[in-house]
Image (cartoon, grey):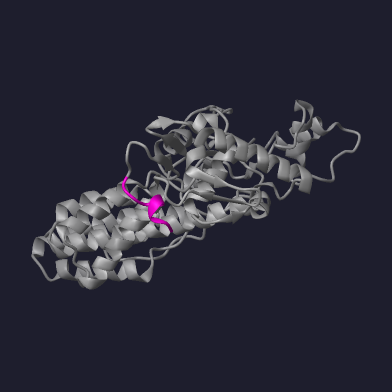
Amino acid sequence: MSDSSIRQRTDEDLSIRVLGGISIQIAQQSVTEHLSTKSAALLVYLACRPGIHQRDALRELLWSSDRLTSGSTNLRVALSNLRRVAGPFLHITRHTVEVQPAASIWVDALRMEQLITQGMHQCQRGGGMLTREVEAQLERALELYAGEFLANLAPLHATKFETWMRYERAHYHALVQNGYQILIDSYLANHQFQLGMETTRRWLELDRSAEQPYRSLMRLFERAGRPLEALEWFEICRRNVWDRYHREPSPETQALYEQIAQVIGRGSVEHRHLVTPLRTSHQPVTIPPNNVPASVSPIVNRQAELNTLERLLLESDSRLLTIAGPGGVGKTRLAQELAHNLLHRAAGRERFPDGIYVVPLEKVETGGHIAQAIFEELSLQGGDPTMAIEDQLLSFLHERRLLLIL
């Protein structure tokens, strides 16, 4: 990692934001719209991985599915695009490409990583306690995390780049979890309970089914002399974990509940009856038939939209719901997360007992082939071969309650 990619920003910087989306500025002026999607992706890769890159390797990264000649041509076009827009920040030769080592380049993800890593080192040296200066540094770092790495990037059809992107998403997500944990542990050690509660609630917005933030809230409320509220947070954790994963909270979280409950039980008589014994019996849950992809990473900053979509599907009589927006804003990802949530909510399973299916239409060339795509995705067979596909599909769907996401 070069110093140029993580230094403080100046007005003449090439500034690249990749957390929560993609935004590229030069001298505080947006240039994102002047770059093709793959040119922008290439610039992000070069900025996030400073050093010399062979042109052949970059061609394989983004155009591996193209023939050798067309892939090389596409790389030349992308580099020409980058020369016009960000030429002073790049060094391009016949065989290699790199960001200029002395160029002033700022990347939000790299800056965040630098600040959190420094905070982690300070935490180790200070035995878990941070100075107020280091706490403020971590707060600034976590404010940079506006969402997952390259969220809502339009499909590139570039397997190697997308594999790298998924790795980076997981890396930065884990880094942020660690950053929040050491910051909140420091607040706890320094008796800054209210500040810790506010910060933990922001952490919880990243993933409401993650147990770490709930345990931190339970400890903060218990240490602040509000143990009953600590137990209320356990119940919220329990509901969200069950809705998403069909299991009880982890033994670590349950042990913390028991610890706080025992303290209350030894306290004043009027509080003892308020502690509910921990019960872990649930009826087995049957998940409706589905082909919904597993959720590999949390969706960030879309909870309000998800809540609205769930309400429209579960509480209204609507039989058709359209998610509209320009290409690349994350409509497919949002719909998949909606399907995942419905499968793991009792109300969703009750509303769509016959299944929830995602039907990709990328390869459907005309509207007349949509029925065929649905027919194949539902794995229908054994119908009347004399009937049209549309009629067979209507016959199958007529008495069933299921959700199709096209």
- Residue at the right extreme, as displayed: 386
Start-end of magenta stretch: 1-8
Query: In the figure, 301 relative to 223: above or below?
Result: above
Q: Residue 359: in sight, yes or no? A: no
Q: Residue 267: x, y in percent?
A: 10, 68
Q: Residue 197: x, y in percent?
A: 21, 52
Q: Residue 83: x, y in percent?
A: 56, 37
The quarter in which the C terminus is drawn is: top right
Quadrant housing residue 30: top left
Q: Who's the residue at 52% across and 29% down the image?
A: 33
Q: Is residue 225 magenta?
A: no
In this rendering, position of residue 304 left or right of residue 295? left
Query: In the figure, 281 relative to 164: above or below?
Result: below
Choose between 341 and 202: the one closer to the eye: 202
Q: Who's the residue at 24% across and 57% down the image?
A: 217
In this rendering, position of residue 89 left or right of residue 39? left
Choose between 86 and 247: the one closer to the eye: 86
Q: Who's the residue at 75% across and 34% down the image?
A: 364
